[in-house]
Amino acid sequence: MGVFILLFVCYTDFKGVWIPRWSIADKNDIFTHLDGKFNHIFLQIFALGEAYYPSKYAPSKIHSDTWLREFLSEAHRRKIKVSAWINVFYSWGYASKTHNPNHLINLQPNWYVLDQFGRSIFDYDVNELQDLGIEGYYLSPANTQVRAYLTNIAEEIMYTYDFDGIHLDYIRYPGKEFIYDVSLRSKFMRKYYVDPNDLFTESEFKMRFSLWGCDDLKKQWQEFIYNDLTIFVKNLSEQLKKNKPDIQISVAVKPNYLSARREYFQDWMDWINLGFVDFVCLMAYNKHIEKYLNEILKVVKEPHRVTVGLGLYVLSPQQIKRQVAFVKSKPFSGVVFFSYDQLKKNKEYLYSIQ
């Protein structure tokens, strides 16, 4: 990982804040609102398949990067590190679909995840997604063209701008319903000579392999999915560090590592234990975080690779202050506040991070 990165994460009292894309308009006023309390900013510049800078690969919402270069310069003058916050596979939300012909929704509709019956998530309406608890439309994590496209986006950002890190958000599947796209099934068939769809629909397989054999293949299928996503995380990290070894790779993750793995195929525990990413940010947005933080300490080899994200939008300043104190009492690297908007509205949140 490099000595610089380890020292930064291990010995720095990490105080981070997520700045969403709709707050970019504040530009350098952001620093006034942060009041010198933070040493790391996660700045969202790629979300819903759109870039907030002039991009060669994605449709751009902002066509000048003067604001971004000035923002990074001012942050570094203040000794604040900045990571480029990227929504990876989450490609569109509940809003009416864009008519921009360069957006992947219109350009590459076949790149999206499929359900068990071959129906694309692209064909689900908003009500159906809401019923499933899914926030929008996801690209296929297993698709090699999707991976190449997203790698290009990350490299473009890293090579063009003076970011200190790349922050990967929504690097997961939307849920267990959408793991049946052709790319993923084809990879599995090349290894096991079995179509995973047939394991759940064809009674002939139960006769051929027995219930025990089918159960074992189903288990192999589940493991294959999160291992395949882990390979992408590893390859992306290595590619980004090849020419910029000091870049910090971080990931926003579901806080319960077991459900992250089972429900979303986000095996982030392996990602940090094997050194594929530099650190993770737990999205611990609720009142009771103590139990699963203590559980994480039992299984993470290096807890200084874990920062704890706290949800200001669901907690009072007093509750946030107590959670910050709890995190500081443990060997985690620090906290990240979600998000800047609440800090701007209520200055009392600032006092909890001293």
Image: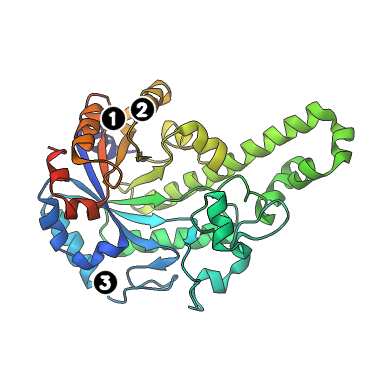
Marks 3/1: CA distance?
Answer: 35 Å
Query: Which corner quadrant of the image does residue 129 belong to?
Result: bottom right
Mark found first going from the N terminus, 3 or 1: 3
Q: Residue 179 versus residue 225: which sits nearer the camera?
A: 179
Quick one: SS at disc 2? helix
Question: Residue 11: x and y, percent?
Answer: 20, 32
Quick one: SS at disc 3? loop
- Left or right, 193 with reference to 9: right
Labelled pair 2, 1 in contact (Cβ < 8 Å): yes
Quick one: SS at disc 1? loop
Q: Which mark is residue 332?
A: 1
Vertical comparison of 183 with 214: above or below = below
Question: Residue 243: x and y, percent?
Answer: 36, 53
Marks 2/1: CA distance?
Answer: 9 Å
Marks 2/3: CA distance?
Answer: 39 Å
Residue on which the image places disc 2: 293
Mark found first going from the N terminus, 2 or 3: 3
Quadrant in which the C terminus appears: top left
Residue on which the image places disc 3: 65
